[in-house]
Amino acid sequence: MATVRRFRLTARDEEMMRRAIQLARQNLGRTSPNPSVGCVIADDSGIVAEAVTAPGGRPHAETLALAAAGSRARGATVYLTLEPCAHHGKTPPCADALVKAGVKRVVVGCIDPYPPVRGRGLRRLRQAGVEVVVGGLEDECKRVNEGFITRVTKGRPFILLKLAMTLDGKIASCTGDSRWVSSPKSRELVHQWRNEYDAVMVGTNTVLHDDPRLTCRIPGGRDPLRVILDTNLRTSPQARVFTQPSKASTLLVTSKRNRDLARRRYGSARVEIIGAPTRRGQIALGPLMKLLAERGICKLLIEGGAHLAGSALAEGIVDRVAFFVAPKILGSGLSAVEGLSRRTMRQAIKLANLRVSELGQDWLFEGEPVVR
């Protein structure tokens, strides 16, 4: 791929690209395995047309926006959060559609890492005489597309580890009580993540102790796929994750040895069973993440519990942590992370790009684990 030239955006370019990012966010969790792309077409008078990738991944944003713009696309500038495709898949190349429409200029947020596209969409535009600007609000565009990018480049979903804990690092009391550690404001944000993520995952103990629903409870939201890890089939078939009405299904992951028993015990129209490789008596997370990626899962939210959190961190598969810290002290209780053994401070997992924000009475700490 030829060297990509990046340019500084004008104030108008930035305004239009921010609108494209806003559009892309609207369909997060609804377009996988395709990315959710925002497209804005503008001329000197303002926005001519705009669109976001349709649920299910098609039609693409460019196709929808060009259809809405009609002849007004000729000579206009197009703002895209992700490079337009240049290969024949289930739909014709969007780069060719932009050329055919006669657009004058295309501003692209970030390069598409998918090998059949990577740099080819830009090259096709330039060969046709279209001015191309790359890197418009690149970091923000990459964050919108982080699930798609991670799945393409690493062969697994983008993984966010979320935990709610007290000031002294406990996620439950010594009696197992964990309702509620965090504030309503923090829980609102978690429901927004469930709306945007393809799947949410918890371990056996979380189901046993909390009996969670793992649904999205915001107006207009959608439920993610619920992934339950239960190597030894200790959860009840009557648990809410298996029985509640929802448009999303539940995926029970157990050992290959227990797969057939699980199908007899839990199998239904709402519950799918898969047998996965195990390591030291637990589901091996690395191979499981590959299986989820093959199913089109781009973004996975891990919500606990402590042993699953420790295993995911130990495997080095966590891309971002989100720790909600409540102004409470328990003393004794269940620690937020179990099974992760770092004998010295030098060996501790460090976080890059740490961000701290206030949510109601809580503090949210977000960062990216540095994998050595």
Image (tube, rainbow, N blue to C red):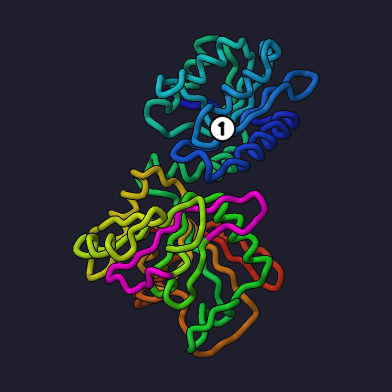
* Residue 64 in the figure: left or right of residue 241: right
Check the image and report above or below for 10 versus 88. Answer: below
- In the displayed orientation, state which residue is furthest to the left: 257
Which SS class for mark 1? Answer: loop
Check the image and report above or below for 285 versus 172. Answer: above
* Residue 208 in the figure: left or right of residue 353: left
Q: Nearer the viewer, residue 320 or 370?
A: 320
| Residue 128 place in picture, x, y as percent | 53, 9
* Crowd around label 1: few <14 · some 14–19 · many ≥20 (10 Å): many
| Residue 246 place in picture, x, y as percent | 51, 55
| Residue 201 place in picture, x, y as percent | 43, 61
Q: Which residues are magenta?
A: 215-238
Residue at 59%, 29% (x, y): give it.
80
- Check the picture and name the quadrant holding the N terminus: top left
- Check the picture and name the quadrant holding the C terminus: bottom left
Residue at 42%, 57% (x, y): give it.
250
Residue 278 appears in view: no
Residue at 31%, 57% (x, y): give it.
273
* Residue 210 in the figure: left or right of residue 182: left
Residue 267 appears in view: yes
117 within the magenta span: no
Label 1 is placed on what type of residue? Thr
Most common secondary structure along the magenta stretch: loop
| Residue 95 place in picture, x, y as percent | 51, 18
Q: Nearer the viewer, residue 150 or 266?
A: 266
Q: For the image shown, how many numbered marks are present on the structure? A: 1
Residue underneath mark 1: 53
Residue 362 quadrant: bottom right
